[in-house]
Amino acid sequence: MAKALVEGLISERLSGGDVANSKYPSFSSQALKLLPPKDLNWRSVAATILGMSYGSDNLVEQQQAFVEAMKISKAAGNVYYHIFAGSCLGSVMFKRGKLREAENLNRQLLRLAIENGIEGTGIAGSLYGSLGSILCEWNDFDEGLRLIKQGIELSELGRDPVILATCQIGLLRALMYRMDIAGALKLMDDLTKRADSFALPPWVTGPLAALRVFFWLAAGDLTAAVNWAQECGLNIDDEINNRYQLEYLSLAHILIAQNKLQDADRLLQRLIAAAKPADHVYMMIEMRLCRSMLLTLKADRAAALAELQSALALAEPGGLLMIFVSKGKPVAGLLEEIVAAQKKDHDAAQAGFSLSYAQKILSAFKAAAPPKIEGLLDPVSERELEVLHLIAAGLSNREIADKLFISLNTVKTHTKNINSKLAVNSRTKAVARAKELGLL
């Protein structure tokens, strides 16, 4: 009976089913009660699936379940399941903002995989991908991207579409952090095609679709974003489910783009309230940063500063950087005010974060800012730089228009402006000149 329950749960996982479903915690718990204490291999599987079944509803309980699964699998001598449960545990740590603990765990598990000759498996790929994502968040993109790509290669060899998609979503976030628009768009297309080809679970396909919203909004295609929200049936008065945090955060960004600031603020406050008891620190930081920018638009500077300070307090234990830098000028401006004020009278205990941490983020902002290029009387705009990257990637004007969701005439105007600013008369020369200037 107990083994039949576990086999059913495994079958659901392998078929791409949604293990993060309300019935699975009870099934997994029942299996653990029924399985003999000495049946360690089956108990390790049941404990791992129990952890997976919690989803994002309670990260504390989910972490405890994976810790228990690691203990049981270690006692059973099952190295593979010990590493698998550990990789799941690292993911939970990341969500809880415990990036330093997650980094240490991933490195320990990789050493264990190497010692046992399974470093070339898909599960090892998940470890490389997770470790790479952590390093990218800490602004170490050279090593971080190398590890994520290594994780993708191993996941492809392991033929696990879920692990592969998870690694690719990590790469997508890193490319978005780097403002590699061309690379991010290409990867998004590849991920969408893969999602259509494999039965990926909702906790993979949902966030993937939600991330596309940010591309639409950046391209000024509010209609596509609104249509997506309507198709998903998202509403600000829905009962909040933490499994759909990114989808609702995307809805908040759509409402802000529509200038429905009161509705967006109400939604964000509800999201934060729901995420707090689940200890979903990473998403709370995202939500508070979004609300900080919203309050800036509402001209409530004091509240915007307070919201950013709350985000800093949540983020410092994990040393998060790029989650702030990716928000651009609005957050940079607020952070400069905070640093200036704290230099005069900083009480770390009262503020909840150290001045040195705030200064470190501010330095990362300045390092990420587009350099002032000598020889350019009129600097290339962010949108023109996006077009320039796509030109360098070999895309035609029509393909660029499709990628950025803008008209063909708009692309031609951007191209004309780029040529004028770079003092060239062709696409080829524009790319060559941009490389000389360090724009590409």
Image (cartoon, grey):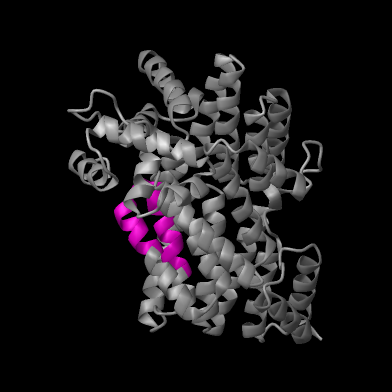
What's drawn in magenta, residue-wise?
Answer: 126-148
Viewer-proximal residue among 378 and 6: 378
Q: Is residue 113 above or below residue 180?
A: below
Q: Is residue 350 magenta?
A: no
Q: Name the one closer to the observer, 322 or 309.
A: 322
In the picture provided, is 242 more to the left or to the right than 180? right
**Residue 122, percent across and down?**
48, 76
Q: Position of residue 42 (x, y in %)?
A: 66, 83
Residue 179, x across and y down, in percent: 40, 43
Tell me if 264 is positioned left or right of 153 in this view.
right
Residue 336, relative to residue 427: is it above or below? above
The answer to whether residue 62 of the structure is visible from this angle is yes
Residue 70 seen in this snapshot? no
Query: Does the segment drawn in magenta span residue 134?
Result: yes
User: Looking at the image, which is closer to me, 128 or 412?
Assistant: 412
Say which residue appears at 59% left-offset and 55% top-offset.
Answer: 208
Q: How many marks?
A: 0
Report the quarter where the N terminus lies: bottom right
Rendering coords of residue 348 (x, y %): 44, 26
Observer-nearest of 416 and 258: 416
Q: Is 395 displayed left or right of 430 in the figure?
A: right
Q: Residue at x 77, y 36 (%)?
A: 236
- Quadrant of the image occupied by residue 25: bottom right
Looking at the magenta stretch, what is its main secondary structure? helix
- Picture residue at 42% right of the left edge, 68% below the top: 151
What residue do we see at 22% from left, 44% from top?
429
In the rendered image, which quarter contains the C terminus? top left
